[in-house]
Image (cartoon, rainbow, N blue to C red):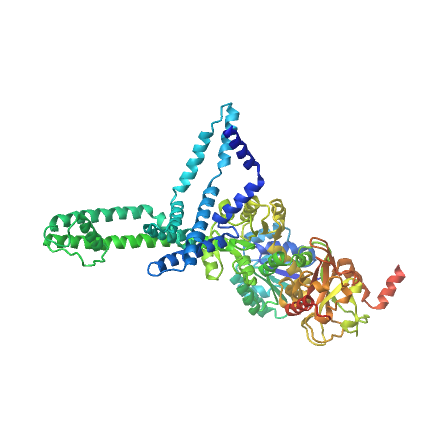
Amino acid sequence: MFSGLIVRFAFWLHGSGRYEKVKTLFRDNLSNSNSKYKKYVDSLMIFLILTSVGILVYEVRNSVPEWMDFYDIYIVSILFFIEYILRLWVDSDAHTVIVNDYNECQFLHKPFVLSISMKKIFKHKISYMLSPSAIVDLLAILPAYRPLSILRIFVLFRVFKLLRYTRSISHFIDVLSSKRFELYTLLFLLVFIVFTAGIAIYVFEETSNSSIETLFDAFYWAMVTISTVGYGDISPVTDQGKAISMVIITSGIVIISFATSIIVSAFSEKLDELKENRIIEDVNKNKTFLVICGYGQLAKMFLRQEENMGTSYVVIDKDPMRVKQAIKDGYRAINDDASRYEVISKFNVSYSQVTVLCLTNSDVENIYIALNAKSLSRKIKVVARATNSDMKKKFELAGVDHIITPSGVANVMLNTAISQPAMYNAIYAILTGKDVANIDEIHTYECNKIIGLPISAIDFKSHKMLFLGIQRGVDGDFVFNPDKNIIIENDDILLVMGLKVSIEYFRQLYARGVSV
Amino acid sequence: MSRQAFVFGYAGQGSSLVAGLKSNQFKIHIIETSEDRCRRARADGFLDVVMMDILNDNELNSLDIDPDDHIVCVMEDEHLNVFLTLSLRSLFPDTNIVAISDSIYTTQKLKMAGASKVIDIYKISANRIHNILNKPVATKLLDSFLLNKGDISYREIHIPNDSFLDGLMVDEVDFSKYGILLVGLIDMELSHKFIFTTTSHIEHKLDTGDVMVCIGRDDDVDRFEKLIKPIKVEQEEVCIK
């Protein structure tokens, strides 16, 4: 009866879209670094930790006002507790275990035993609770319990809890853990020397040295000496003890230099990766961003033209030399192969509008990157470069949204240059987007005062602008040089040519609604 | 048409560029330094292919190049391309030399070497990417120029003798009535420089010999070009009709 209810409840949860949605929401905001609001959750937790640690430290020598105590005991601890419970909840799906087990039993005509599923669920949850970060979380709740002042020491765990919310520290730990083997070896050596030296000094000096009374004193002396700190509160008095000191000091220097070199080499090995991860994290925060594959002449020219892109782009190239060059030129570049699925999938496709520019010199490469991006998500917009127009069809099949053919462009320009030379410079200026021939769009949402006016009512000439045409609606047709009596409607886009300043002034004028 | 185009280089970019030129009814001469590429050019259907040492001025001078002809420099090696441009400019000071460049640094050097026009193949493409990303409507119009998509194109129109436009101010002519837009003009009275209508501060008077650059649908531009010819011609046309 009871187990039947539980199973039914599990199935209800399994089928409930809303439950799934709520759980995903919490999961994203607690642990998905691509989530929009996670940084706010993190900032709040960091604030709670810092204030509560501050209060506890202040409390050591001063009496704190009641509201601070209240804040520390109730608000901080309760929030920590809620966070702990939420993390425990989102870590694994209990109802799926029951549903799967139940289905399996049905399939095999086997009686369903709830306790087996419960054991599984319990195991999952316990394994989460025993993970280091969960233990820190739990211990960080404890300092709230005042009667036991020993619990105050757990305030340290609140400081440890900061690790969860700060990237740099967790990166540091990642780097160190990559050298786990070397560091463990060194640690073993250290323990071995401290142990041997401690026993030796104890044996030689326990009777003659008044400051060494217990084996603990001996180990303490060995540790202080090997670390080259040497407080001097305990020092050897016999010749044997001094000899041990000499050996231990020498090995201390060796161990410290070893440890330093291991940590430094770990960092230098991981530094590029860390930097690249940081670049990807930064770019993922943008609502729209560009992934530029290949750092050749076309990419260079494009980046030179695009100013104020901030962090909303990243250059990817297979060739480390070209990446170096890109970084030298001041661009955000990473060394990776964009045709690999894992590389493109690092980008935050579900939250942002991503545009991939395939600008390498090779058609094969560009098509592969385009397919790779499109296979990850159809939402990704792909602009690709093709070496000649024969390739166009293949690019279209691959689902590329726009195809760029520099040689085709050069052909058009060459024909213009020799058959209509007088106008060559004019067309070149238009096509390269020079300021004298800047073609720009005026959207009705930024100039809402033009809505409802017929085109003839706007004196483009006096604004030093040339009206080229209009696009009716967001996805409507473009009408070149339309009838001057048509009325501008919402969502229309006007296409004009003119100096940037003229167009900017026009925008300001019609946005403010000053009559003209 | 007796005009000739001398194309230096038939590798990579060069071969696809020349293929685009074929349609333009020029007499095309191809000059190459390698026997292999000469053979390829011949195989592609070009009859007038010459192999020569382009570093040698005497050989270059032997080419029969007139001031009315066009020279296109598309050597694969950019250093060679700059050197060639410089040599040709010194030998043929009045000929139109068009050079192809693939980087901003080369563009500058080619200009200094005396090329009349330098086509930077990536600059236009880079701007097109910029437009695709930021100005989709502008892209539609510009693509119709670049890719021959749609029927809107640009054309230079010379004002003929005794045209009705002769003597009119630019403001007095309503070009959009003819379905075309005036982008700018070369006002021979003032200078030989192109002036965009959107940047000029003064009123321009249209005169015989001025060059207008217009954009419009192909048939509208054709009609307009016919229309501005002297009335006499029009009358003849009417008679024929």
Residue B189 occupies quadrant: bottom right
Identify which residue, B166 or A505, lies in the foreground: A505
Total marks drawn?
Answer: 0
Identify which residue, A85 or A200, lies in the foreground: A85
Asked if residue A45 is positioned above or below residue A435 in the image, the reply reads: above
Question: In which quadrant of the rendered image does the C terminus of chain A lie?
Answer: bottom right
Horizontal arrangement in the rendering, residue A449 relative to residue A195 (left or right):
right
Horizontal arrangement in the rendering, residue A160 relative to residue A39 (left or right):
left
Which residue: 40% across, 60% down?
A65
Question: Which residue is at the far top?
Answer: A109
- Give x and y (percent) for residue A332: 49, 58
Identify which residue, B57 or B108, lies in the foreground: B108
- Give x and y (percent) for residue A305: 57, 62
Identify which residue, B37 or A59, lies in the foreground: A59
Can residue A20 be seen? yes
- Give x and y (percent) for residue B225: 78, 64
Can residue A385 be seen? no
Question: Which residue is at the far right?
Answer: B239
- Give x and y (percent) for residue B15: 60, 54
